[in-house]
Image: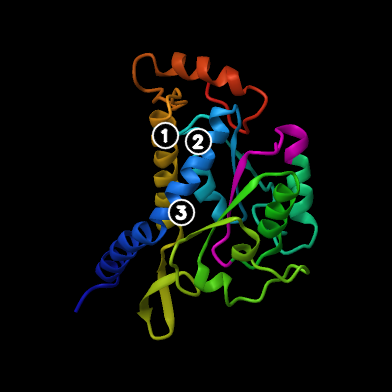
């Protein structure tokens, strides 16, 4: 009999493979959209409320990732994510500081797709002319009742959807009768965003553009290269390198 850890690893690994295959076309399409925006001088934005913020932070300011990525951060760490109007104010504050510009792309992350803050950030970005990519569990977002008065869940608001293929409640392993553990949303979500970054880099490379990639500061010349590259985005990023 498999242990819970063995069951999680086997199930999650298979789910990861299926998520890549399911989202392959969307990843390529969105990679081209982000690539064109970056080529035009734009920035990629992310927002995730509560635990979903970890997924958004995965591609912000990290070695081997894209430099022009900035996060809409919630100082309340999701505590007020279902207070109607809170997400709208987060987006407005972020716009006043870093700018949400027409033609740019934002990735909004919510496993359930039903909470007010991510939906409001998505709507605020769309109103400013940004393309919204929703990263969610379509199974949950399609069935969970939204708390947003507009009546739509994230998958319905977004222009493009990346499906993490998560189950209701996120956890996939029964550790005791009626008790589930082993969430997959972070594992799958972070991988999908790294695949998206690589599709973006591929589009930029294939269309003759320079790659604004963050170098490891632990390697010779990395810090200097990152400082030089970050100057182009000095007023736009929530986290600067150097």
Element class at badge 1: helix
Q: Horizontally, is 204 left or right of 156 in the view?
A: left
Q: Which residue is mark 2?
A: 35
Q: Which mark is residue 201?
A: 1
What's the CA distance linking mark 1 and mark 2? 7 Å
Asked whether 158 or 121 is in front, the reply is 158
Task: Give yes or no for contact between labels 1 and 2 (Cβ–Cβ under 8 Å).
Answer: yes
Question: As displayed, is residue 229 above or below residue 12?
Answer: above
Asked whether 211 or 216 is in front, the reply is 211
Question: As displayed, is residue 86 above or below residue 72?
Answer: below
Can residue 5 be seen here? The reply is: yes
Q: Which mark is residue 217?
A: none
The magenta segment: 94-112
Residue sitting at the far front:
207
Instruction: Where is residue 13? Give x, y as percent.
Output: 29, 61
Asked whether 46 or 2 is in front, the reply is 46
Element class at badge 2: helix
Q: Horizontally, is 37 left or right of 182 in the view?
A: right
**Does the magenta segment cover residue 114?**
no
Instruction: Rate crowding at label 3 as few (under 14), some (14 to 19) or many (20 or more) other CA atoms within 10 Å.
Output: some
Q: Which mark is residue 26?
A: 3
């Amino acid at each position: 009999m498999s242990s819970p850890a063995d069951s999680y690893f086997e199930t999650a690994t298979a789910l990861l493979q299926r998520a890549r295959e399911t989202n392959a076309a969307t990843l390529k399409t969105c990679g081209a959209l982000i690539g064109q925006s970056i080529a035009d001088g734009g920035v990629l934005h992310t927002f995730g409320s509560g635990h979903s913020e970890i997924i958004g932070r995965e591609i912000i300011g990290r070695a081997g990732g894209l430099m022009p990525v900035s996060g809409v951060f919630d100082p309340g760490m999701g505590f007020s994510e279902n207070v109607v109007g809170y997400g709208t104010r987060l987006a407005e504050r972020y716009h006043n500081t870093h700018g949400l510009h027409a033609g740019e792309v934002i990735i909004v992350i919510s496993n359930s797709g039903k909470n007010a803050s991510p939906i409001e950030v998505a709507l605020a970005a769309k109103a400013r002319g940004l393309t919204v990519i929703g990263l969610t569990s379509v199974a949950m977002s399609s069935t969970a009742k939204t708390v947003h008065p507009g009546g739509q869940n994230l998958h319905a608001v977004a222009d493009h959807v990346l499906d993490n293929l998560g189950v209701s409640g996120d956890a996939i392993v029964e550790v005791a009768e009626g008790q589930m553990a082993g969430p997959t949303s972070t594992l799958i979500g972070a991988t999908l965003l790294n695949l998206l970054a690589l599709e973006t880099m591929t589009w930029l490379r294939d269309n003759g553009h320079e790659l604004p990639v963050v170098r490891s500061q632990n390697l010779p010349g990395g810090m200097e290269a990152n400082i030089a590259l970050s100057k182009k985005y000095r007023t736009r990023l929530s986290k600067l390198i150097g």
